[in-house]
Image (tube, rainbow, N blue to C red):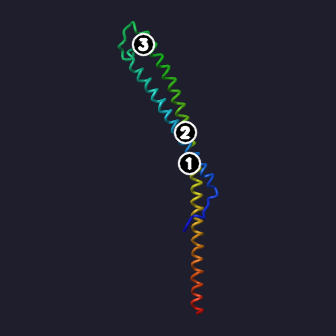
Amino acid sequence: MAVNGFRFSLERVRSYKYSLEEQLKLQLAAVRRLQEEEEARLEDYRQARAGCPAIRGAVVAEDLLQEVALLEALDSRITCQQERVARARLVAREKRDQVQVAMRERKVLDRLRDRQLQAYRYEAGRQEQKQIDEAAGNRYCRGRGD
């Protein structure tokens, strides 16, 4: 049963939805990379803060003011970076939701296409069987007439 004659009427829409889904997946990958970079930067700041001599208690009195200023600067960077990480996570979550919606829309069209293809194949099979039956009937009638 050839499907050469089958034409899905919404193929352009399905194709568009597929390409949109692929674009969104690429965007999601880029957003996730950015999120990972932001999280790595935050971890670097936290490690730098944990490595400060003032935190470890190995600071001399002369360097105390400098170390306190360094800690305050690191605390400020950590706070800002936590906000950036939170924003990156939010953007990634929104992009993931968009990808999921696009996938659902495409899958609906895929299921519709599959159902229509199945109906087409069924009807083509019926027509083929009808032709076979007619040919067999004609052969039988010709054979009786001789």
How far separated are the C-alphas under marks 1 and 3?
Answer: 52 Å
Residue 142 in the image: above or below residue 127: below
Which quadrant of the rendered structure holds the N terminus?
A: bottom right
Q: Earlier in the sequence, mark 1 or mark 2?
A: 2
Q: Amino acid at mark 2?
A: Gln
Q: Amino acid at mark 1?
A: Met
How far separated are the C-alphas under marks 3 and 2?
Answer: 41 Å
Which residue occupies 58% across, 80% down? 133
Which residue occupies 53% across, 32% down? 88
**Residue mark closest to the camera, 1 vs 2:** 2
How far separated are the C-alphas under marks 1 and 2?
Answer: 14 Å
User: Along the horizontal axis of the image, is 22 left or right of 42?
Assistant: right
Q: Which residue does the numbered mark 1 point to in the structure image?
A: 103
User: Along the horizontal axis of the image, is 26 left or right of 9?
Assistant: left
Q: Which residue does the numbered mark 3 point to in the structure image?
A: 67
Q: Position of residue 98 (x, y in %)?
A: 58, 42
Which residue occupies 50% across, 36% down? 32
Q: Position of residue 73 (x, y in %)?
A: 48, 17
Q: Amino acid at mark 3?
A: Glu
Which quadrant of the rendered structure holds the C terminus?
A: bottom right
Report if the CB atoms under discs 3 and 2 are less than 8 Å apart.
no
**Residue furthest bottom as drawn:** 146
Residue 14 in the image: above or below residue 27: below
Which of the two residues, 64 or 91, is positioned nearer the viewer here?
91
Q: Which residue does the numbered mark 2 point to in the structure image?
A: 27
Q: Earlier in the sequence, mark 3 or mark 2?
A: 2
Q: Residues within 10 Å of mark 1 (few under 14, many from 20)?
A: some
